[in-house]
């Protein structure tokens, strides 16, 4: 079982992923050719030569960028608890001041300011846990970094690790205060020994910094699911789902396929219910603006999260309830079963829940709700909660069933 031993991560449930790099300038299109794939992979997918791609840095000047405003919104409006920012994606470009490598935002761009530092400071101000993404194996700029879909056999990967990856990790872990998490990605052919070198380096500088599931050879501190994949069942231990709001991580001007807020709320609750965290991505454009379509979705989800935060943060994995409920998701704390109601209903019928009930209330304002505990004609236990008229047409709110018992008692189905 994966155990990060970090209570903040177990309680966090909802975080902000930010993918931002030179690929934002291309925004899904290079020399008239569009990519219908994840936009941060454009250098790989459209075979852009290193020297051509490097020229993008001269155009990077995000005059609209405001880290404070993004982090304030993430914390206050969206209800998120932690932030993970791409310090260096596969393209190889550092979005921070990297003394060991000039291909970075401070040295190589007209903008000239450290982006990571600005996120770091804003996270301190708004009390957000802060971590960074670092592509430890793929580096399409370094001749010895791996590149997926290419022949990597002639490379001296150890040299890349020793001369770029590890020095940069040292900089990131030394110059930016507390780093709560490192998000490694696409470990490819990294060996067990090389993975251990990275782990020792990180823990030697910041012992409380946790590592995601893609550190290499399954040696990280928690399980990372596939991008945009949610485990079918409750999953034990610490884990996280990295996910997009549209169909790309880095900004793509052609992708406005924003998910519906109802669907994001449902996914957040499924993930919380099954015991994991939801790390949801934004991809700012080349000027530093977060696409309005994305902001609108996150604002709407945030209203749900903030109204019902008691029923999301600090909750624990729920056992397997025997019925599929289209209209609800469960979360739980000790002595409390939360029922998130996602479709309009007149009453809540919790069939095969056998707890003794102390009280039922609406999470948003703690107003008590009338309920009945008993058995249906077939003999199965049931808790029935009456909903007030003003809720009958509403969706997306939570109620709390306070139980005499610490855990919900779900009865098995019997023949
Ligand atoms: O950082 C984000 C992605 O860039 C990264 N993980 C998230 C968090 C990621 N790495 N790999 N992948 C996602 C999937 C790779 C898909 C590929 Fe392809 C399919 C690589 C080659 C074929 C898509 C299509 C990218 C290039 C062509």
Image: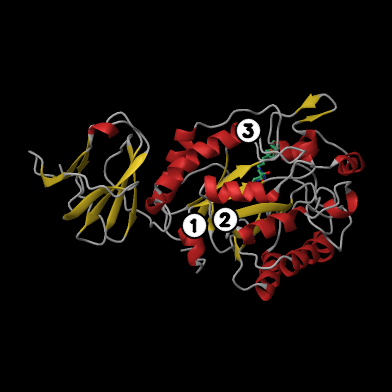
* Left or right placement of residue 386 versus residue 377 in this view: right
Image: 135 above or below 347: below
Whole-number angstrom distance, CA of label 3 to CA of label 2: 21 Å
Q: Report helix, strand or loop for mark 1.
A: helix
Q: Position of residue 7 (x, y in %)?
A: 48, 66
Viewer-proximal residue among 71 and 280: 71
Q: Position of residue 240 (x, y in %)?
A: 52, 53
Residue that carries the numbered disc 3 in the rendered image: 292
Q: Residue at x 21, y 61 (%)?
A: 405
* Left or right placement of residue 145 versus residue 7 in this view: right
Whole-number angstrom distance, CA of label 1 to CA of label 2: 7 Å
Residue that carries the numbered disc 2 in the rendered image: 82
State the quadrant of the C terminus. top left
Viewer-proximal residue among 111 and 25: 111
Say if mark 3 contacts mark 2, CB within 8 Å: no
Q: Residues within 10 Å of mark 3 (few under 14, many from 20)?
A: few
Q: Position of residue 3 (x, y in %)?
A: 49, 66
Res 136 seen here: no
Q: Residue furthest top?
A: 32
Say if mark 3 contacts mark 1, CB within 8 Å: no
Res 329 seen here: yes
Residue that carries the numbered disc 1 in the rendered image: 12
Q: Residue at x 45, y 45 (%)?
A: 305
Say if mark 1 contacts mark 2, CB within 8 Å: yes
Q: Report helix, strand or loop for mark 2.
A: strand
């Amino acid at each position: 079982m994966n155990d990060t031993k970090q209570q903040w991560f177990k309680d966090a449930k909802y975080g902000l992923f930010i993918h931002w790099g030179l690929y934002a300038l291309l925004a899904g299109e290079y020399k008239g050719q569009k990519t219908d794939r994840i936009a941060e992979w454009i250098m790989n997918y459209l075979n852009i030569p290193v020297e051509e791609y490097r020229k993008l840095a001269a155009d990077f000047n995000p005059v609209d960028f405001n880290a404070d405003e993004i982090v304030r919104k993430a914390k206050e409006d969206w209800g998120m608890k932690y932030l993970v920012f791409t310090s260096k994606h596969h393209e190889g470009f550092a979005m921070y001041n990297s003394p060991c490598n000039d291909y970075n935002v401070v040295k190589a761009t007209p903008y000239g300011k450290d982006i990571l530092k600005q996120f770091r400071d804003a996270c301190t101000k708004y009390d957000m846990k802060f971590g960074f993404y670092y592509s430890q194996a793929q580096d399409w700029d370094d001749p010895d970094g791996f590149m997926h879909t290419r022949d990597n056999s002639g490379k001296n990967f150890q040299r890349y690790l020793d001369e770029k990856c590890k020095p940069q990790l040292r900089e990131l872990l030394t110059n930016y205060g507390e780093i709560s998490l490192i998000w490694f990605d696409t470990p490819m052919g990294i060996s067990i020994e090389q993975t251990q070198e990275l782990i020792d380096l990180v823990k030697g500088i910041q012992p409380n910094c946790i590592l995601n599931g893609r550190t290499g050879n399954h040696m990280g501190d928690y399980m990372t699911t596939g991008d945009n994949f949610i485990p079918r069942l409750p999953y034990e231990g610490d884990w996280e789902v990295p996910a997009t709001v549209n169909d790309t991580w880095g900004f793509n001007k052609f992708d406005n396929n924003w998910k519906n807020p109802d669907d994001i709320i449902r996914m957040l609750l499924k993930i919380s219910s099954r015991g994991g965290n939801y790390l949801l991505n934004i991809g700012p454009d080349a000027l530093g603006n977060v696409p309005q379509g994305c902001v609108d979705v996150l604002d709407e989800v945030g209203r749900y999260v903030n109204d019902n935060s008691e029923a999301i943060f600090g909750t624990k994995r729920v056992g397997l309830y025997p019925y599929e409920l289209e209209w609800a998701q469960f979360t739980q704390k000790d002595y409390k079963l939360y029922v998130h109601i996602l479709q309009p209903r007149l009453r809540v019928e919790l069939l095969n829940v056998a707890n003794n009930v102390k009280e039922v209330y609406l999470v948003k304002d703690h107003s008590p709700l009338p309920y009945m505990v008993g058995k249906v004609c077939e003999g199965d236990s049931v808790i029935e909660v009456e909903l007030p008229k003003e809720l009958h047409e509403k969706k997306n709110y939570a109620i709390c069933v306070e139980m005499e018992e610490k855990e919900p008692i779900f009865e098995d189905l019997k023949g």
